[in-house]
Image (tube, rainbow, N blue to C red):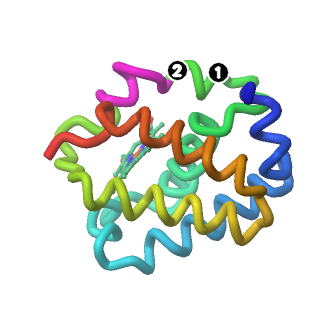
Amino acid sequence: MGDDRLYEAVGGAAALDVAVTVLYDRVVSDPTVAPWFDGVDVPALRQHQRDFLTVVLGGPDTLGTAARYRGRELARAHAGLAIDDAAFDRVRDHLLATLRELGTPPEGLAEVGARVDALRGDVVSA
Ligand code: HEM
């Protein structure tokens, strides 16, 4: 599934805005992952969720965010944060639950899950 098709399967720009809010609420109210975001201000954290979704869903990306954050850049952004597999899995599950709530079809969820998993090695460092 190409980037734009996946983005449309999730519901496009309007769904992405809702997804950022729902994902944000889930992450900050989960005590197992919230500590990583302590001290990150609200706009930066919302931006994180938006960047996260842009990288994994594709879609219109006029600022080049998705391309910028593949590979080494993603590794650099998370270097030193000591993110472990458990935290990665929690954030991944929050993302999938959010998209499921918003009505993303099962094939779309499977594709998003596969894309997130492909980035594990760039994000996990502990
Ligand atoms: C595939 C999964 C993920 C993607 C695509 C992703 C994406 C990003 C991006 C693009 C940035 C850079 C933002 C910037 O340039 O300021 C970033 C930073 C960050 N990420 Fe992630 N992230 C992922 C997983 C995680 C996980 C699992 C955690 C913690 C449990 C996490 C915590 C953070 C933190 C704390 C920052 C720094 C935020 C700041 O200080 O502004 N990320 N992430």
Element under disc 2: helix
> Residue 19 in the image: x percent, y percent?
69, 61
Q: Which mark is residue 68?
A: 2
Q: Quadrant of the N terminus?
A: top right
| Side (left or right) of 74 relative to 15 | left
Dots 1, 2 in contact, CB < 8 A: yes
Q: Is residue 34 magenta?
A: no
**Considering only vertical position in the picture, is 29 above or below 44?**
below
Amino acid beneath label 2: Arg
Instruction: Look at the numbered disc 1 and say if its residue's Cβ is closer than 8 Å to ligand 1.
Output: no
Q: Quadrant of ligand 1?
A: top left
Residue at the limit of the structure toward the left, as seen here: 126
**Considering only vertical position in the picture, is 67 above or below 126?**
above
> Residue 59 in the image: x percent, y percent?
76, 32
Query: Which quadrant of the view contains residue 100?
Result: bottom right
Measuring 48% from the left and 63% from the top, which residue is drawn there? 93
**Magenta stretch in the rendered image:** 69-76
Residue count near mark 2 (Cα–Cα under 10 Å), binned few <14, some 14–19, many ≥20:
few
Q: Main secondary structure of the magenta part?
A: helix
